[in-house]
Image: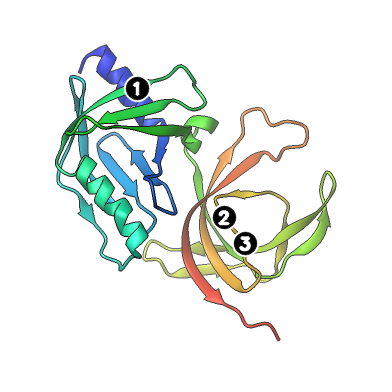
Amino acid sequence: MTEKKINEAQTITAYTWSYQPSGTPTPIQLHFTADHLGITTGCNNQGSSWKIEGHHLVTSSLVSTMKACSPELMKNEQFSSNLLNDQKVKFELNTSSVEQPSLIFTAADGQKYEFKGTMTPETKYQSQGEIIFLEISPETKPCTGVAPQTCLQVREIKYNDKGIKTQVDKDWTLFYDQIQGFQHRADQRVIVRIKRYERKNPAADQSKYAYVQDMIVEQEIVQKP
């Protein structure tokens, strides 16, 4: 692999790439690792292998989960399938903005589609996240950190290699930080798998850690009395 291809591959894997087709409620996101392309459509997830050949991104046949989706989200799946299923699609990178570069694909019909990049947490924090599991209560509590705020209530959970719970904290504790990607609901108890990243040089009002939602493990609607 030439140095140019290596640099392009490093840039592609350092970001999550988003594009929202017209008439759809949520963007498509592309997640690249060294040899795998994952596609989040808003309903089903798709994936394939990928490599760079010249000015083209070469993908294999997409595999997909098989959930039923709304017609609007099906448009996302159709779009990503048409663009990236077993394709050799021309691309270019615009890295004039390190914070938000562009990955531009040219489809077979000549139409260009610009995906905007957002740094992956691994790129932003220059480390691999530690996996932790938190049960999050539907009820929040007033608390005071740097200033008065509202805190989540959490309990840490541990699992063994077989996915069986081995430890659940008895008491709820106040969680003073934010969890990127997590949306709290007052009628829902959830267990969330989280990647915890250590900040290299946190600001005076920042925690030592940054927390990013990885996936929802369990969720349950709770009826209020």
| Type of amino acid under label 2 | Phe
For disc 2, the neighbor class at 10 Å (few under 14, some 14 to 19, many from 20) is some
- Name the spot of residue 162 as percent of width and height, x first: 36, 66
- Name the image quarter holding the N terminus: top left
Scheme of image coloration: rainbow
Q: Is residue 83 above or below residue 68?
A: above
Left or right placement of residue 60 versus residue 210 in this view: left
Q: Are marks 2 and 3 in contact (CB under 8 Å)?
A: yes
Q: Residue at x 59, y 58 (%)?
A: 183
The residue nearer to you, when weighing 113 against 8, is: 113
Q: Amino acid at mark 1?
A: Leu
Residue 218 placement, left or right of 54: right
| Position of residue 51 measured from the top left corner of the image (x, y, whole percent) | 20, 30
Q: Is residue 44 visible?
A: no
- The reply, left or right, for residue 62 in relation to residue 205 is left
Residue receiving disc 1: 93
Seen in the picture, residue 201 relative to 180 is either above or below; the reply is above
Give residue 91's quadrant in the image. Answer: top left
Mark seen at residue 182: 2
Q: Amino acid at mark 3?
A: His
Identify which residue is drawn at 27% across, 13% down. 3
Q: CA distance from mark 1 to mark 2?
A: 30 Å
Q: Is residue 79 visible?
A: yes
- Residue linked to disc 3: 184
Q: Are marks 3 and 1 in contact (CB under 8 Å)?
A: no
- Pointer 1 with pointer 2, Cβ within 8 A: no
**Point 33% across, 65% down: residue:** 69
Considering depth in this image, is 19 or 21 the residue closer to the camera?
21
Q: In the image, what residue occupies the spot 30% across and 68% down?
A: 68
Q: Residues within 10 Å of mark 3 (few under 14, many from 20)?
A: some
Mark 2 element type:
loop
